[in-house]
Image (cartoon, helix red, strand yellow):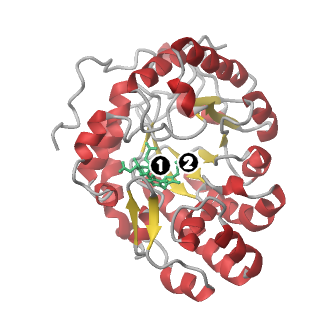
Amino acid sequence: MSAKPTDKPSDKPTEKPTEKPTEERPGGTASPQAGGTTSAFLAACRGEKVDHVPVWFMRQAGRSLPEYRKVREGVPMLESCTRPEMVVEITMQPVRRYGVDAAIFYSDIVVPLKAVGVDLDIVPGTGPVVDEPIRTRKAAEKRLRALEPDDVRYVTEAVRGLVSELGDTPLIGFAGAPFTLASYLVEGGPSRDHRLTKELMYSAPDAWDALMSRLADIAAAFLRVQVDAGARAVQLFDSWVGTLSRADYVRYVKPYAAKVLSSVADLGVPRIHFGVGTGELLGEMADAGADVVGVDWRVDLAEGIERVGKGRSVQGNLDPTVLFAPQDVIEAKARAVLEAGRSARGHVFNLGHGVLPATDPDALARLVELVHSYEVG
Ligand SMILES: Cc1c2[nH]c(c1CCC(=O)O)Cc1[nH]c(c(CCC(=O)O)c1C)Cc1[nH]c(c(CCC(=O)O)c1C)Cc1[nH]c(c(C)c1CCC(=O)O)C2
């Protein structure tokens, strides 16, 4: 690697000026964390008082950063996820550059599938591609075994390395939710309409249950490995579940998402649950057992907060393409999100989906500054 994890770009702020120890924080009632400090991110997730609105970005690590492209040169995506030193470096890059309030573990939702032996790859510009799709109960039972911590020792090692590197900044662990994982396994790759996935769901309840139950167990095991190694929150990505009606979500998907979320409840870390185009599903996704529900940009955040309901926090929801707008437009739209977030139990500022690869990192840096300077209380 060309840069040591401790190298910091000299033209960027290296400290988060807003991060203060608990005892200096007026009204710092958040639960004490290891090291005796609080995190605005964890406090917002739990609905506790914050001194600033916390912010991080889905896909904050990745192709929008020149330092990421440099480190990844010549290394295939899935291989990069198995190299702890590289994972630490890539995860740290946006934390150093932006001073975001949380890091997200650099990996992919298909890593645990690959780790249990599914033959798949991530094709640049396309996404995950599965050699032999899984479309029967027999195939699900034969090819999806349980995930053991030893299958992903490189994850444990990387998380441990990150926790010492990150100090007080929490690390978010993540997994793909059963429906989104199933969609790749059944379709064999990305899909627009998820026809084959829905066909299996409607026509073969036994196969669907075998597939979704195993994926729920794998997702839960993958989250547990990350939290056991030191991750302080988890996000369950059900990116493509917005393709379903509410009734179908409740019948065919919610029980399995609930299984994942309840199996990690004992870990005591905030559970974030997110999907794209899920405006009609927000209440159900909250009810599946999330502490924080991610809202995409199609939903007015104030309305999203209503749908998520009391007793949960929200995360979101600036349209990622707004970062290509003139600065005054970005600022007005970000402020509207912050204003709407005030009515939530807790608000974690984020985009409504991942950072687009063409995004100017300086626009994200300015956005972090704006969010951090917004007056709370
Ligand atoms: C659906 C999904 C996937 N992977 C993921 C999801 C859920 C989140 C979402 O909805 O965006 C999750 C994911 N994938 C990646 C992360 C890393 C952490 C972060 O968000 O910064 C996370 C959280 C790295 C990655 N995962 C991938 C990249 C890009 C590959 C590269 O840099 O070569 C990164 C940084 C590859 C990937 N993997 C997947 C897709 C659709 C792609 C993009 C394919 C492409 O456009 O080339 C599947």
Callout 2: helix, strand or loop?
Answer: strand
Indicate which disc residue 173 carries.
Answer: 1
Helix or strand or loop: what does disc 1 sit on?
Answer: strand
Asked if residue 145 lies left or right of residue 71, the reply is right
Q: Is mark 2 within 8 Å of ligand 1?
A: yes
Q: Is residue 296 left or right of residue 190?
A: right
The numbered dot on residue 235 is 2
Q: In the current view of this chain or complex, which residue is farthest to the bottom?
A: 138
* Residue 84: numbered disc: none
Determine whether 242 is above or below 255 in the image.
above
- Residue placed most toward the observer, 31 or 77: 77
CB at disc 1 and ligand 1 closer than 8 Å: no
In the rendered structure, the answer to whether residue 193 lies left or right of residue 5 reads right
Q: Position of residue 100 (x, y in %)?
A: 44, 28
Image location of residue 49, percent across then percent down: 63, 23
**Which image quarter is the N terminus in?**
top left
> Toward which corner of the image does residue 219 lie, by quadrant?
bottom right
For image coordinates 33% across by 17% down, the residue present is: 13
Q: Say which amino acid is labelled 1.
A: Gly
Instruction: Identify which amino acid the numbered label 2 is placed on.
Output: Gln
Distance between the Cα atoms at labels 1 and 2?
A: 6 Å
Q: Are marks 1 and 2 in contact (CB under 8 Å)?
A: yes
Residue 189, relative to residue 358: is it above or below? below
The one nearer the camera, 84 or 331, is 331
Question: Residue 131 location, x and y as percent?
Answer: 43, 76
